[in-house]
Image (tube, rainbow, N blue to C red):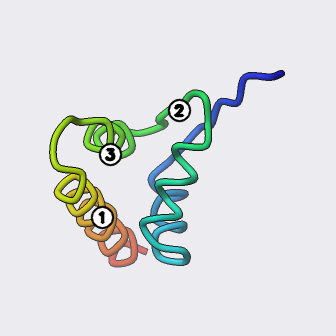
Amino acid sequence: MGFHKRYISEDQVCYRYTHYGMEEVLKWIRSADAIICTDPFTMELTDVLDSEGDKTKIWNKASEMIAMKSLEMEKNS
């Protein structure tokens, strides 16, 4: 059985979020054995997703982060 690692970037996260939604982003991230973040945004996002506390608040904060980053990226393109 192999070890499944996944490299994630802000582009990939924002694409999945805008096309498939927050639940799909979470499934995609959680389906790997190891996550390798390629930028500061994904490092911060995974820190939020791994934090302790109310799962609804964590979900909402992560969703807001991705939405804001998606808008920022769209504005800059």
The amino acid type found where label 2 is placed reads: Ile
The amino acid type found where label 1 is placed reads: Ser
Q: Which residue is mark 1?
A: 63
Where does residue 5 sit, x and y in percent of width and height? 65, 30
- The secondary structure type at the circle numbered 3 is helix
Where does residue 55 sit, x and y in percent of width and height? 24, 51
User: What separation in Å lies between label 2 and label 3 (alpha carbons)?
Assistant: 12 Å
Q: Nearer the viewer, residue 37 or 48?
A: 48
User: What separation in Å lies between label 1 and label 3 (alpha carbons)?
Assistant: 9 Å
Q: Which residue is mark 3?
A: 45
- For disc 3, the neighbor class at 10 Å (few under 14, some 14 to 19, many from 20) is some
Q: Is residue 49 left or right of residue 77?
A: left
Q: Quadrant of residue 75?
A: bottom left
The amino acid type found where label 3 is placed reads: Leu
**Residue at the (54%, 74%) spot, across then down:** 20
Quadrant location of the C terminus?
Answer: bottom left
Rendered view: 73 above or below 40: below
Who comes first in sequence, dot 2 or dot 1? 2
Q: Are marks 1 and 3 in contact (CB under 8 Å)?
A: no
Who comes first in sequence, dot 2 or dot 3? 2
Where does residue 64 sit, x and y in percent of width and height? 24, 66
Q: Quadrant of residue 67?
A: bottom left
- The secondary structure type at the circle numbered 1 is helix
- The secondary structure type at the circle numbered 2 is strand
Where does residue 61 sit, x and y in percent of width and height? 20, 58
Q: Which residue is mark 2?
A: 35
